[in-house]
Every structure is written in structure tokens, then in C-alpha cells.
Image: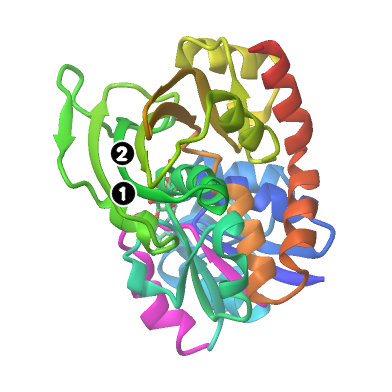
Amino acid sequence: MLKVGINGYGTIGKRVADFVVKHPKLELVGVVKYTPDQDARLANVNGMNLFTSKESLDNFKSKNIEVKGTVDDIVEASDVIVDASPDGKAIGNKQNIYIPKNKKVIFQGGEEADIADVSFNARSNFNSAIGKQFIRVVSCNTTGYCRLIKPLMENYKIKNINAYLIRRGADPADTKGSALNSVEWKAKSHHADDVKTVIDVNMTSVAFKVPHTLSHINSMSIKFDGIAPTKNEILDLYRKENRVGVLNSAKTSAEIIEVVRDLGLKRNDVYMTLLLANTIQIDGNEVFFSFFVPQESIVVPENIDAIVAQTNLMSKEESMKTTDNVFELEKIKKNLENIFA
Ligand code: NAD
């Protein structure tokens, strides 16, 4: 079994930890928490070994929270570290801990692309990550775009893409976030450039941040070189993708999340991009559609595949199939597609 340690037990770290435990070839060494709060106690309740920084040891002790060791200890005991720290922190971890200990690390999309040897999306470039010491799993939105653009590019010639993002202002558990009564926008947002770290495509993006926590809702206007696919061809293409759900009748993010809650999916996580089929419009060689991105969960299967690619545990096909099974993606996709038929 490959030993995996998780540095940072927040939105992404706690989800990745759950699936490392479930994966047939991975073993969780533990998770690092920096504050002795309810999430630290939760990790203990869930039977996970807890580690913290040297400076925080006394703080955890004074709160009677059991800790197995320090960050140095977990890094040494692990074959691979998943760094799920807040945006911008991982570069310090890399310089101070991972490089001196010569460790393999998976970074997250909030870091600059040059933190890693390769930016990663399993469907798009699994093979270029095989054996790499430092891999960066691209952000939630970029993952959503890659999962949709890659299959299209394999079948049609894309001239250019204009992307429009409606970004959630905060995650449900955040105490920070967007302005309550204002929409903030960014022309030439970083998202198009981020997609280009994985896929060679001509693309621009503009992003709008809104007071909403349930999901991002993104759109693409895609110009094809030559004939554009028909609506049925687009639907057929994405129905074959396990990490894309095709919803025909959904009209709001709230009703999608209500169904997800009723299905009993842990933390309301769906892990997949949901194509909103009723938004598809085709005009000559141009196609427009929108899609739902579950920001907290979409990158979690990608983190698992990144670990497998990094350590050459399985081929791309075997890894994605195993990950899909561990996450029960086929079942989630089928249920959502049937309910929003
Ligand atoms: P978070 O704030 O929810 O959790 C971060 C955790 O890291 C916290 O528990 C914090 O205590 C801990 N931490 C603090 N300092 C640390 C350090 N030096 N090293 C390691 N951990 C440290 O953050 P998050 O939302 O899970 O985001 C983590 C990364 O994943 C970021 O790069 C982010 O951009 C990316 N990401 C987030 C989302 C999302 O929707 N939240 C989606 C995709 C990617």
C-alpha cells in the first residue's frame, strides 16, 4: 500500500482523506491540522491520525486533542503528501519541508502553475504526470473546463473558446466571502490561462463573483473550425464521460443541490461537472452551453488519480476506472441524469 499524508484538513483535505481511506492501493498516514478546533476533534473521531506543526503541539495538548506527531513526522512517514493548504501557503511548505525531505507532493489549484512539474487533469493529461515529483491539480473551474473541452477536441477542431464564469462567493463552511450586495468581475480572468497549462487551446475568460455558495455556474461559447457538432452529438459525447453528468431539465442550482441532499450524498458532493443541456445553443459553427461545477468536490477524484500517476501505480484507464468506482461516479451520474431527464 502506498502511504499518503495530507497537509491541511480543510475543504479539499478532508475530502481527499476520505477517499484515500477507501482506495484499494492507498493507505492514509494521517492529516495535519494547525488549529485545535472542531475539525481536529472530528479527524480523531473519524479515526484519523492527527499531526500538527511543532509550534502548535502545546496548544493541542492543552485542549486534550491527541496528536501523533509533527509535520516533519508525517512527511517522513509518507510516500506522497497531498498539500491542501490555503492559497499561497504551499510554496513555503515546498521550500521548507518537501524539497529538503525529497518528497513527492500533490499541490492544489490555488498555487501558481510553476510550483509543480506539471498541471494535472486526469482525463486530459494523466500520462504526462507519470513519475513527476511535483504535480498541481488544477482548480475546480479549470477541472470543469478540461473535462468538457478535452472530449470535444478529440472529435472536433476548435478555433477558439470564450468562457464566462459565475463564481460562488464562498464555500458553505466559510466565514469569509463575497460582498453581500455586489457582483465583482474580472475581465481576462486567470481561468483561460489555467486551462492552457493542461490543454493547448485558444481561449479567453471573464469571471463574475456572486453571493452564492452552492456551486459555480460556467459557460462557454465555442467556435469550431468547420462544422460544429449537433446538440445530439454533444449530448452523446458527454453521456459517455463518467465525470460529466448531462442534466436536461434542471433550472436552478438550488434544485440540483436539493436532489443531491435527498440522494444522501455526503457533504452534497457530486464530484462531476454537470452539463445543463437546456442551455445548449448552436448557431452556424458556434456552440454555447453552461455547466454546474461543484467547487468543493470536483477536484477530489483528480487528486487520487494524480497520486496514482505520480507513483506509476496503475495505467490511466485502470486508475480512472478504480477512482470512478471508489467514488461511485457511475451511480451518481445515472441517478442525476434520470432525475433531471
Ligand atoms: P481551506 O481553507 O478550507 O483549508 C486549508 C487548510 O489548510 C486549513 O485546515 C488550514 O488550517 C490548513 N493550513 C494552514 N496553514 C497551512 C500550511 N502552512 N500548510 C498546510 N496546511 C495549512 O482551503 P481549501 O478550500 O481546502 O483550499 C485548499 C487548496 O485547494 C487551495 O489551493 C484552493 O485554491 C484549492 N481549491 C479549493 C477549492 C474550494 O472550493 N474550496 C476548490 C478547488 C481547489
> Which mark is on residue 112?
none
State the SS at label 1: helix
Q: Quadrant of residue 1?
A: bottom right
Query: Which region shows up in magenta?
Result: 79-101
- Quadrant containing the C terminus is top right
Residue where numbered disc 2 is placed: 163
> Which mark is on residue 191?
1
Type of amino acid at the residue the image marks with label 1: His
Q: Position of residue 2 (x, y in %)?
A: 76, 72
Q: Is residue 125 left or right of residue 58?
A: right
Q: Are marks 2 and 1 in contact (CB under 8 Å)?
A: yes
Vertical position of residue 305 compared to residue 340: above or below: below
Type of amino acid at the residue the image marks with label 2: Ala
Q: Residue at x 68, y 59 (%)?
A: 49
Q: Position of residue 174 (x, y in %)?
A: 37, 33
Q: Position of residue 203 (x, y in %)?
A: 30, 50
Q: CA distance from mark 2 to mark 1?
A: 9 Å
Q: Residue at x 73, y 37 (%)?
A: 329
